[in-house]
Amino acid sequence: MTVRPIELVARRLAAAKRVAVITGAGISAESGLRTFRGATTADLPPDMQSLWKEFDPATLATPEAFARDPAMVSKWYDWRRMGCLAAEPNPGHRALAALQRAVEAKGGEFVLLTQNVDRLHQRAGSIGVVELHGTIMEWRCTTSGERMTPPESAFRTYPPTSPFTPGALLRPDVVWFGEMLPPAALAAAASAAGSCDVFMSIGTSAVVYPAAGFLFDAKRNEAFTIEVNLEATPASEFVDATLGGSSSAVLPALVRAAFGPGAMA
Ligand code: OAD
């Protein structure tokens, strides 16, 4: 693992024509949203631990689980949706929106890939976010696939029924284990990873594929690769630079170092 000072990384970022970023649950941790696994910044009570420490993904995050118990699964996702609606973007999200503006202002290309379903990047001002794992903010008809944004209050009954097709249900528009990622998102991610000069992996444990593979695609394509995380991950030994620490502290500092103090304004 090569550790380089933030200024060196900032220089690579400032010189890049094409920047691709992938984020995971860690970037939203300081907005109060629980990660799935891995480190946290705080010594947290059990009900704030990583989700997959308290819950079993096999009973919640698979099509089979929804088929078995749609009421329980939809209630759990709606509970998480309420958490996302109550959360606010943090300085890490805002720094990536500022980074996009700075890169695009000098004629460069910027692509933000996220595994997060919380929409906090968009609320912080990021444009064209590629949602690899869908979003919890939209739900879709189990029969027709039509999507809707539910009201900002919890559903009254579980499972919620579809307004599109009589007898059908609504399910969260997220990608469950065993399901395909949205083809357009996959294509956008593959293209960004294959053409960028700098690839950043932020707040992800880098264990869930295919998302975790884009960093390696970028590396094979000779991009400069950077990881921002509180702890080492399986990607750490392959990246060119590691910025250890919380994304809400590291990213604003990095954007300021690369593009000047005004870039975060
Ligand atoms: P994880 O929960 O697996 O990993 C979160 C990562 O963020 C860990 O490596 C932590 O060390 C790091 N982290 C925590 N707080 C941080 C902070 N403040 N600053 C920087 N890093 C921090 O989340 P993902 O990698 O996003 O998929 O998980 C990938 C997928 O697994 C999710 O999209 C979800 C899950 O199962 C599905 O549900 C399909």
Image (spheres, rainbow, N blue to C red):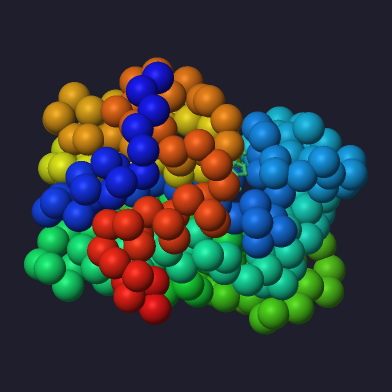
Position of 3 relative to 259 (above/below): above
Q: Can residue 133 be seen by looking at this rendering?
A: no
Image quadrant where residue 57 sits: top right
Q: Quadrant of ligand 1?
A: top right
Q: Is residue 254 visible?
A: yes
The quadrant of the image that shows the N terminus is: top left
171 vs 58: above or below: below
Q: Nearer the viewer, residue 12 or 97?
A: 12
Is residue 48 or residue 77 the one in the foreground? 48
19 on left or right of 241: left
In the picture shown, does residue 42 fall above or below 32? above
Residue 93 position within the rendered picture, expressed as x and y whole percent measured from the top left = 48, 63
Residue at 18% over, 35% down: 223
* Residue at 46% from the left image edge and 68% from the top image edge: 94
* Horizontal arrangement in the rendering, residue 101 relative to residue 175 (left or right): left
Q: Quadrant of the C terminus?
A: bottom left
Residue 60 image offset from top left, x and y in percent: 73, 41
* Residue drawn 27% across the image and 41% down it: 8
Of residues 155 and 205, which is closer to you in this image?
205
Number of marks in the rendered image: 0
Whole-percent x, y for residue 91 in the image: 53, 65
Q: Position of residue 169 (x, y in %)?
A: 67, 61
- Quadrant location of residue 226? top left
Residue in the picture at 33% in, 27% down: 239
